[in-house]
Image: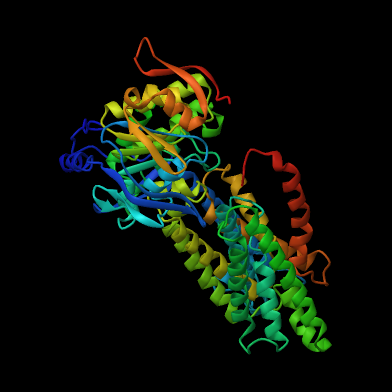
Amino acid sequence: MIPNRLFMPNATQETVPPNGYKLLTLGHKVRILIEKKAVVRNIWLVLILLLSCVMTLGIGTMMISPKEVIAVVFGHGSPMSQFIVQDLRLPRLLAAVFTGAAFSLAGCLMQTMARNRLATPGIIGIDNAAMAFAVSSVVGMGLSIAPSAMALAGAATATALAFGLAGGSGTRGYRFIVAGIGIGAIAGAVTQLLLSQVSIDVANSAYPWTVGSLSARDPFMVHILGAGVAVCLVACLVFASQFALLPFSDQVITGLGANIKYIRIIALVLCITLTGLAVSVAGPVGLVALVGPEIARVLARYRGIPLVSSALTGALVMVIADLVGRTILSPIELPVGIVTAVVGGPYLIWILIKRSSRSSL
Amino acid sequence: MTASAFQHTHSSSYARLEAEQLTLKHGKTTIIERLNVTLPEGQVTAIVGPNGCGKSTLLNGLSRVHAPSSGVVLLNGKDIHSLPSKEVARRLALLPQDTLAPDGITIEELIRFGRHPHQSALKQWAMNDQDAIDYALKAADLIGLKDRLLDTLSGGQRQRAWIAMSIAQETPLLLLDEPTSALDLGHQIEVFELIRTLSKQGKTLAMVVHDLPSACRYSDHIIAMKSGEILTQGSPKDIMTKELVRELYGVDCDLIPDPMTGSPILINIQRVRG
């Protein structure tokens, strides 16, 4: 056989990375490619997110200047503003950042897997099922497991059911989405049924689970969610080169020597974990999963799978939506789920109308 | 390092792909039963036959995309399903019919995916990766187009880009499922000539082809299938007869040798009457 190409032995020659990439070498073994544009994009998003966080911490019934907010963050500032920022506003802000990132990252993964931008965990029923399980626990019909754990169980159950009903066609195609929509509708109905069967006080305590709100968050769950988001982001970076294959057809993926089932299971486990944890903190705020990744894709000019950017845009959308919900009708607070629905609903319609765009995602 | 890399490429060029007693099913329907076949090394094999005869299924079985119900596909004597998938992908490349690609991908980025089986999470880029990509761009005559978006290309250019991706995979074996089915005549020739070039360089190729004259013209070996069975196989000149064409497609025709190449040409084709 004639050799495919000529090697030019040249020990001193540097390995040149592809255009637009930076090669990170560690010793002889580790060679990691980093896309420069993605890094710049994500640094900008982090800066904007930090800025809106400072604003959120300052804005409210009691206004605090950005300077004072920064002072408080670094351990200074008056006791009054310390109390307001650290004890009242910061926990809520963290909940917004983590849930936004979780919903949006889960959405980006699911959309990529299904090759369909409508296939977010919210639309295929994962949010609703997590909510139904959590509510059943609150109203005392669960298996006396904490609502948060029930939310996770609900997310996993909905995904398994959607898979089962899709009948072997995998996460591609409309069967999976249609099955998921059905499951979501059933879960929504079950939630209503449960709420109508219990006393008004119990129903009230379950209410935050059903609208998507950051006002009733469980501090312990916020920490768990934060850890979950961090772990899932790291997992996304580790499996980035595998996830990058997801938009190809199954046969191409197999031909390139990757295991499609294994990639899909990892992506699904990440989706379920992120969605279940996020619902257990904020209830179903599913539209973030639709809007967040879309903004990230626009920023990435529809190239690659912007997982990290999606997490950041999701966090940003959630922080801003909660800020709007808190302030627009002050002193009445609008649940963040209602704000995202008011903004996300028209957006969904716009996507459907603008369907003619080149992008299939 | 470069010397050993060369050795490695050279030794993995041994490429024997065969099926023994291979049975392939779609659900409960048996498509192929107890089939034995070997791809002749260093040659272009064309798999032909009427629609639904199982030729694409056979190709998917040989490329481990379709798992056998019984029997075995052997790559260099080893069960292809027992080998690590990445190792198989360094010896066997596949160009399926169904080739979805990520949005906004350029030609060079597509070809870069061909290096996936040679990379890992910690070793994402090596010197010979760029060499292989440059070689593939050149072989498929795509250097001037390397920064163009895949979906702005013509059908023939796009198909060449997919083949270039499999060239960058640096495998001794390449299987193609109807590589020319959606292309017009000019683009078909582009692709077939690229396949011949690859064969000249020592690759073993197999392709599913609909067009019988093209199969005769561009392959060294033809496998004629009907209803999941191999009717006959051999060089186009030896096996192509009026009777075979009639048996395969239910049409009558006359065969004459191409005055330039000697490969059989079908003329006076008509439906069998009576």
Q: Is residue B147 visible?
A: no
Is residue A84 rendered to the left or right of residue A13?
right
What color scheme is it?
rainbow
Which of the pair B242/B151 is nearer the observer?
A: B242
Give residue A83's position: percent from left, percent from top. Answer: 65, 79
Please name the residue shown 55% across and 55% down the image. A113
Is residue A169 rendered to the left or right of residue A335?
left
Q: Quadrant of residue A1?
A: top left
Give residue A106's position: percent from left, percent from top. Answer: 58, 62
Which of the pair B144/A181 is nearer the observer?
A: A181
Q: How many marks?
A: 0
Quarter of the image where the N terminus of chain B is located: top left
Q: Is residue B185 visible?
A: yes
Q: Quadrant of residue A271?
A: bottom right
From this viewpoint, which residue is outermost toward the top?
Answer: B259
Give residue B39's position: percent from left, percent from top. Answer: 30, 38
Give residue A168's position: percent from left, percent from top. Answer: 55, 59
Quarter of the image where the C terminus of chain B is located: top right
Please name the residue shown 67% across and 56% down the image. A290
